[in-house]
Image (spheres, rainbow, N blue to C red):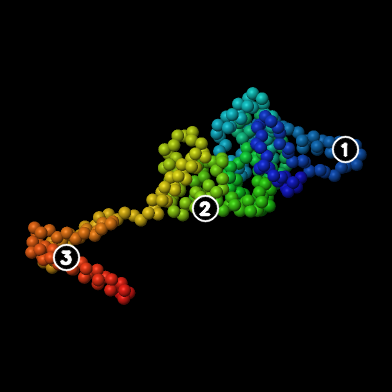
Amino acid sequence: MGASLMARNIFNQPPKDETERAAPSPAPPKAAKLPGSVGGLRDSLREITANSIRDIDPDQIDMDGLRDRLVLEDSSIDELAESIRKHGQQVPIMVRPSAQPDRYRIVYGRRRLAAIRKTGGTVKAIVRTLDDDASLIAQGQENNLRLDPSFIEKSLFIKEMQEAGYKPGVIQDALGLTRQGVSNHRVVIEQLPDGLVQLIGPAHGIGRRQWGDLAALSAKVDLVDIAKETLAALPDDTPSSDKFQAVYSASSRKKARGDKKPTTRDLTTIIKDKDGNSLATLTVADKAIAIKVTKKDNPEFSQWLEERVEATLLQLFDQWRNERGTGS
């Protein structure tokens, strides 16, 4: 099945529970038929092998490859494990052979594998020989059908795929996105500081616009420090989407405080004459400038200044206005 056919509008489909139905698996490649009964028997054996479901010890399966979920060990895994205890594993996972003998690499079904590791026993698995591109596409599409990833989970998955060197077409097919859709996710994730998403979590229900607004704040405030301080005050069971809102609110408040002009503390200077005697006190505050001459220390000067302070102040004002007018 071609990659383009595997990428059909998967995000518009409602998520399916473990017990509802099995996702269709990629069809095995068709081999050329051999003549006679030997060829027919060979084809039959290949078809049976390709479509059989094996019981595999979970310890034989390596959880490698790119992760498309931020949270794997959470309450939903416990709920899935309980469902499997009651009803059995209704939907197989998919694995591919490892380079090591009797070992496999997970393609999709990480949540089911984690749940079965809790319940104990073997895991039902379809074994396929897939290259990296086909494995990635199968992983992205099947996992998206099980539980729709959040916007930021898709963004992180895209970033990891790009850093791993996957081609744009493969990335688009894996997530069922257009080129513009991939770009929209990438623009946001590239603006967010490292570690922030891991602190907040998948934040289901928080979309591109909200994550974009938070990313825009990164140029003004330290989002990681704010997130650590904010989340430390929240209960451990706070939903991820609520964590996002708390971090966004705290970051917005911090930015608003930073946009305001800092309050100038009162600066007081003692003015002395050439002999070092105190003459007056100059106080520069946020909203006023005050010159204070103590009559007790300088009675005669205080009297002289009192008689001339208005004229002197007007003279200084005219001097300032003339200097400003001449541009000096």
Closer to viewer: mark 3 or mark 1: 3
Q: Which residue is mark 2?
A: 191
Residue 295: give x, y in percent of width and height: 10, 59
Quarter location, residue 320: bottom left
Residue 80: give x, y in percent of width and height: 61, 30
Q: Earlier in the sequence, mark 3 or mark 2?
A: 2
Identify residue type, mark 3.
Val
- Image height of 125 relative to 198, above or below: above
Identify residue type, mark 1.
Gly
- Give the spatial CA distance, label 1 vs label 2: 58 Å
Q: Quadrant of the C terminus?
A: bottom left
Do the residues bearing badges 1 and 2 touch, measured as CB atoms within 8 Å? Answer: no
- Residue at x 48% of width, y 35% of height: 238
Q: Which residue is mark 3?
A: 309
Mark 2 residue crowding within 10 angstroms, few (<14) / some (14–19) / many (20+): some
- Give the spatial CA distance, label 3 vs label 1: 116 Å
Relative side of 206 to 29, left or right: left
Quarter location, residue 99: top right
Identify residue type, mark 2.
Gln
Residue 263: give x, y in percent of width and height: 31, 54
Q: Secondary structure at mark 1?
A: helix
Q: Secondary structure at mark 2?
A: helix
Mark 3 residue crowding within 10 angstroms, few (<14) / some (14–19) / many (20+): few
Q: Which residue is mark 1?
A: 40
List the single residue furthest toward the top: 86
Residue 6: give x, y in percent of width and height: 72, 45
Relative side of 280 to 263, left or right: left
Residue 294 in sight: yes
Q: Which mark is residue 319?
A: none
